[in-house]
Image: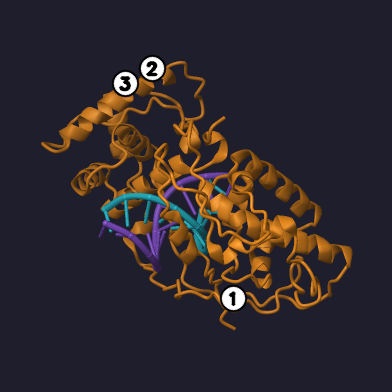
Chain colours: A orange, B purple, C cyan
Amino acid sequence: MAPPGCFPGRYSPTYRSSDPRRCVPNPSSRILEDASLMCNSWSPRHNGDIFSGLNDGLLSRAEALAAVDIGKHQSGPQPGPPLPQLKHDMVYHHGVGGPPPHNARPHQMGHHGMEGLDMLDPLTSSSMTTLAPMGEAAPPHHQLHGYGAMNHVMNHHHHTGGLGHAPPAHLGHPAAALHPDTDTDPRELEAFAERFKQRRIKLGVTQADVGKALANLKLPGVGALSQSTICRFESLTLSHNNMIALKPILQAWLEEAEAQAKNKRRDPDAPSVLPAGEKKRKRTSIAAPEKRSLEAYFAVQPRPSGEKIAAIAEKLDLKKNVVRVWFCNQRQKQKRMKFAAQH
DNA sequence: ATGCATGAGGG
DNA sequence: CCTCATGCATA
C-alpha cells in the first residue's frame, strides 16, 4: 500500500473549524470611514479610472507613512483605495533577465527518460486501469503525495541569479540524453503546458481526474495531486522549479492516458465512494479595503518584521497570522512563472 | 481559477 | 519565521 515513496505523513487534521478566522473581517463602517478620510470615492466596478496610475504611487507613500506611523499611534490616515482591483497576481517584473535558475530535479524522478520514452513499455495499459476518468475504486484517503519531500530537497539549490552557479546537477546517465536546458527552458514549459491541456481535454479528462490518476501511475514518490495544482501547472502559475518538477510526471501520465485511450481500455464501473464528510476548513476572506492596504504595504516592504505585521494586523483588524500568511503568499506569487520569466 | 492555509524543512 | 509545494474552499 504505502507507495514506495510514501513519505512522512503529511497530513494532520489540525483544523480549527471553530476558529474565529471564519468571519469576514469587519465589513463597512470602519472602512467607509477610512475611505472618507482619504477622500477617495472610487467605485469598485467602475474602474476606468485614469487616476489609478498616479494614485498608486501616492497610495504607496501614504501607506508607507502609515506603516511607520502605526508604530507610534494608530490614528493616522488610512488606506486610500485608488488602485483599481488590478490583478496584482503577477504584475511583477521579476528581474530574471539573465540567469534562469535551472535547478535540478530530484533524482527520484530523474530517471524519467520520458522524452526518451524508454519507460513506457511492457505493461503499458495492463497494470494501470484508472488513468482515464472513471469511477475511482476507492480512494485510500486523502492523497498523500509523497512528493513534496523531494521538492524541498531540490529547492535548496539557491537559484540566486548570476553567481557562478553550479552545473546542471542531473545525474549522468550512461546514455540518457537529459537535456537540462531544454527542460528548464520556460518556453518549453509553456509550450508543454499548452499541449498538455489541449490533449487532456481531448481525452475528456478533467484537471481533478488527472490529479487522481497520477497516483495510478506508480511512479516512485509520485502520488495524487489536486485539481488546483494541475490547473496551476496548465496556467503556469507555479514556480519555475515546481513546473520543472511536475512536467515529467504529467508527461508520463499524458502518454499513458493516450495509450490507454487508444486501446479503449476502460471498464464501466463503480461509483466512487465519496469520502465521508470531514472537517471543513474555513477560508478567511480579506475585504477589499484591507487587501488594498496590504498591497500598499507590500509595495514598500514585502517582508515586514513580526512586529510590523502585528501592527498592520491590528490596524486592519485582522489576525496577525492572517496577515503573516498573506505576505507569505504574496511573496510566493511574485516568484511564480507565467509571463514573469524572461521574455 | 484563485485566495487563504498547512506543513516540511531549514535557519 | 521564512520559503515552497500543495490543497481546500470558494468566487
Residue closer to the observer: A286 or A134: A134
Say whether marks 1 and 2 touch (CB < 8 Å).
Answer: no
Q: Is residue A96 above or below residue A16?
A: above
Mark 2 crowd level (few <14, some 14–19, many ≥20, 10 Å Cα): few
Mark 3 crowd level (few <14, some 14–19, many ≥20, 10 Å Cα): some
Where does residue A323 sit, x and y in percent of width and height?
Answer: 31, 48
- Amino acid identity at mark 3: Leu
The residue marked by circle 3 belongs to what chain? A
Residues marked 2 and 3, same chain: yes
- Amino acid identity at mark 2: Leu
Mark 1 crowd level (few <14, some 14–19, many ≥20, 10 Å Cα): few
Secondary structure of the residue carrying tag 1 is: loop
How far apart are the alpha carbons under marks 3 and 1? Answer: 51 Å
Residue A275 is marked as 1
Image quarter (top left, top right, bottom left or bottom right) of the N terminus of chain A? bottom right
The residue pinned by badge 2 equals A54
Tell me which corner region of the image, top left, top right, bottom left or bottom right, holds residue A160. top left
Where does residue A270 sit, x and y in percent of width and height?
Answer: 76, 78
How far apart are the alpha carbons under marks 1 and 2? Answer: 51 Å
What residue lies at 89% left-to-right and 67% top-to-bottom? A263
Q: Residue furthest bottom?
A: A1
Residue closer to the observer: A187 or A336: A187
Residue A58 is marked as 3
Residue A91 visible in the snapshot: yes
How far apart are the alpha carbons under marks 2 and 3? Answer: 7 Å
Q: Is residue B9 left or right of residue A128?
A: left
Q: Is residue A135 above or below residue A21?
A: below
Q: Is residue A277 above or below residue A61?
A: below
Secondary structure of the residue carrying tag 3 is: helix
